[in-house]
Image (cartoon, rainbow, N blue to C red):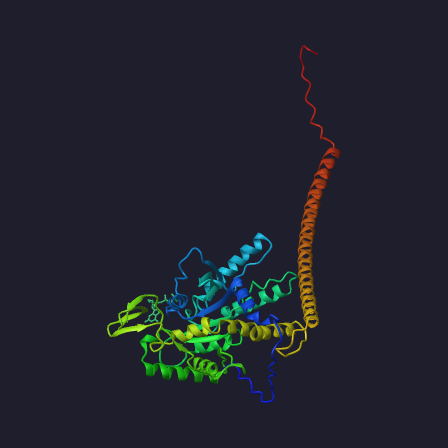
Amino acid sequence: IGSGQVLPEQPDLKIIRREINGFVGFANLPKQWHRKSIRRGFSLNLLCVSQRGLGKSTLINTLFNRNLDDGSKNKVEQKLEGLKIEGSSETEASRDDEEAQTAQESENVRSSVKIKTLSTTIEENGVSLKLSVVDTPGFGDAIDNSDSWRPIVDEVNYRFDQYLDAENKINRSSEDDNRIHACLYFIEPTAHYLKPLDLGFCKQIHEKCNLIPVIAKSDILTEEEIAVFKRRIRKQLEDENVVLFEPPQYALDDQETIHASKSLYEKIPFAVVGSTDKVENSKGSLVRGRSYPWGIIEVDNASHCDFVYLRDLLISQYLEELRERTNSVLYEKYRSEKLTKLGIKQDNAVFKEFDPETKQKEEKQLHEAKLAKLEAEMKSVFHQKVSEKEKKLQKSEAELFARHKEMKEKLNKQLKALEEKKHQLEHSLNTPIPQSPAQPKKKGFLR
Ligand code: GTP
């Protein structure tokens, strides 16, 4: 299940050593590289996935020997997956807000995984390490956890996309590498089997980042339980074709190095114990560990737990290999799949030689494909807006027409009523007023 390969021995390879006649200077190249590395510093983006309370924060603090969660110095970014609000107008944003709320409510039943990134720079003997720990609170907390992996895989893909976009910019900066270099997956110390949640996650993530599973809080298990549990986990992962990070072996490596890397790989999943507290050991010295009524367990003692092996793999021995595999295998795979989806064909060889012309062509194709996609999207938005406008106009035209008809009918009625009145008046004018009967003449002295 390992990804590392032992390169075949090359019996025909003849190394001809020549003495050089004078000073050339290339023997200094490693020193130049060393100086450059120190100046530039190193970086590690670590994804930590576990169910609640399995000792994730404690282990990270133990690995980097400081409390990473405590510090206004540390930059913390938080986002709720799937709720990236986009929208040009206020109304759109507020509608999205409502949708976001309903989405969040329904996610409580299914998955409510959040992504929390904590970035900090630490220094050891003048060497600086830019560390980003990506935490995933809420993983495995829901009633139905069948898609708990989704927001995490989306985050890894999103980071690949960001890198791909940055690569295609005119001013490229190699500094902004937010890709995940390793994923620490914490397994509950049940001493039984991996749960569907564990297997489901490992199956989804192993092709996206270097997967390093660890058995959390292993101090609660006996040595035999750990050995059996490790074998079962390896078997289950093997059956599901899950690839774990394997320290690479090179043809020029000596036997000792090859043996060390092999035995390191065999110890995966590392049975770890985390603690930054100091306890007194049997020799009277203060060491990092956990104290129990029956004795103490030392974190940095390889005969007590696998913590030191994890530290070797993740930091002191293979940090650069983790970055290298992320770049040349995992990212390359993602990139070529993405380009293929966009309709761009390319050479399948992952380790192909760098050809600037091909690269430029690929970039041009990618750019053109993106432009075409953007144009198609803009066209569809335009058509949609036009048809919406047309519908609105048709509706208001129909309304106006109805109102006009109504008004016309009203006026017609009024006109009719007025004509009726006029007719009545005319009729009454033409009708002669009847004469009143003649009054008898009064006889009187006024006559
Ligand atoms: P959430 O972020 O809340 O999910 O917790 P977490 O996974 O970060 O766990 P945390 O490091 O906060 O540890 C939870 C508890 O487990 C604490 O009481 C720790 O002291 C304890 N703990 C951490 N590591 C170990 C360990 O290796 N063995 C044992 N026995 N306990 C541990």
Q: Residue furthest top?
A: 445
Does the rendering let one see residue 416?
Answer: yes
- Which quadrant of the figure shows ligand 1? bottom left
Residue 161 lies, in percent from the top left, at 58, 67
Question: Hey, which residue is sitting farthest bottom in the picture?
Answer: 11
Residue at horizontal 71 percent and vertical 28 percent from the top: 435
Q: Give left or right: position of 171 versus 305.
A: right
Residue 47 falls left or right of residue 215 = right
Q: Quadrant of residue 18?
A: bottom right
56 relative to 424, above or below: below
- Whether residue 110 appears in this view of the structure is no
Q: Position of residue 444 (x, y in %)?
A: 67, 12
Residues 173 and 106: in front is: 173
Residue visible at 54% across and 74% down in the picture: 325
Residue 236 percent location from the top left of the image: 44, 83
Q: In x, y percent, where is residue 204?
A: 51, 76
Q: How many marks?
A: 0
The residue located at (57%, 52%) in the rendering is: 90
